[in-house]
């Protein structure tokens, strides 16, 4: 995310599930990392590619996007292969990378 121009503050917590619930992350879309976009309040869940975050920011009506679980073809997990599907918080496909 840094190389894509994003800055962030990392916060460690012992109760990740409580924070995800408070932020409205659907349990079935949960992953290992949760980010809040400070400017918009939108949520990024999991290993979502930076280009998808840019797309999210352009669609202010979308509450959040997720790369559920720990997909092997996601940033930080492996190479994007064109088959990583990120979804919005209603579970609808948002992007394929």
Image: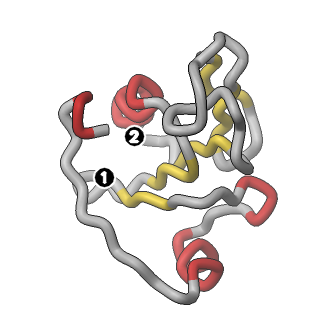
Q: Residues within 10 Å of mark 1 (few under 14, many from 20)?
A: few
The foreground one among 66 and 47 is 47
Which quarter of the figure has residue 58?
Answer: top left
Q: Provide residue 19's location: percent of width, then percent of height.
A: 53, 79
Q: Provide residue 34's location: percent of width, then percent of height.
A: 50, 61
First-in-chain label (2 vs 1): 1
- The circle on residue 40 is 1
The foreground one among 71 and 54 is 71
Q: Provide residue 48's location: percent of width, then percent of height.
A: 52, 38
Residue on which the image places disc 2: 60
- The circle on residue 97 is none
Would residue 70 appear left or right of 48 to someone viewing this image?
right
Q: Residues within 10 Å of mark 2 (few under 14, many from 20)?
A: few
Would residue 87 appear left or right of 54 to someone viewing this image?
right
Above or below, comparing residue 88 to residue 31 in the picture: above
Q: Secondary structure at mark 2?
A: loop
Above or below, comparing residue 11 to residue 87 in the picture: below
Inter-mark Cα distance, 2 to 1: 7 Å
Please, which residue is most extreme toward the front here?
A: 78
The reply to whether the C-beta atoms of the residues labelled 2 and 1 are less than 8 Å apart is yes
Which quarter of the figure has residue 97?
Answer: top right
Please, which residue is most extreme toward the top here?
A: 82
Q: Residue at x 73, y 50 (%)?
A: 69
Q: Secondary structure at mark 1?
A: loop
The foreground one among 36 and 13 is 13
């Amino acid at each position: 995310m840094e190389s894509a121009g994003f800055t962030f503050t990392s916060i460690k917590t012992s109760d990740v599930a409580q924070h995800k619930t408070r932020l409205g992350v659907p349990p079935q879309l949960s992953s290992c990392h949760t980010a809040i976009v400070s400017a918009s309040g939108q949520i990024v869940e999991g290993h979502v590619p930076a280009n998808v975050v840019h797309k999210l920011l352009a669609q202010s009506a979308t509450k959040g996007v997720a790369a559920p679980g720990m997909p092997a073809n996601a940033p930080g997990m492996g190479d994007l292969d064109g088959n990583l599907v990120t979804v919005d918080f209603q579970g609808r496909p948002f992007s394929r990378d």
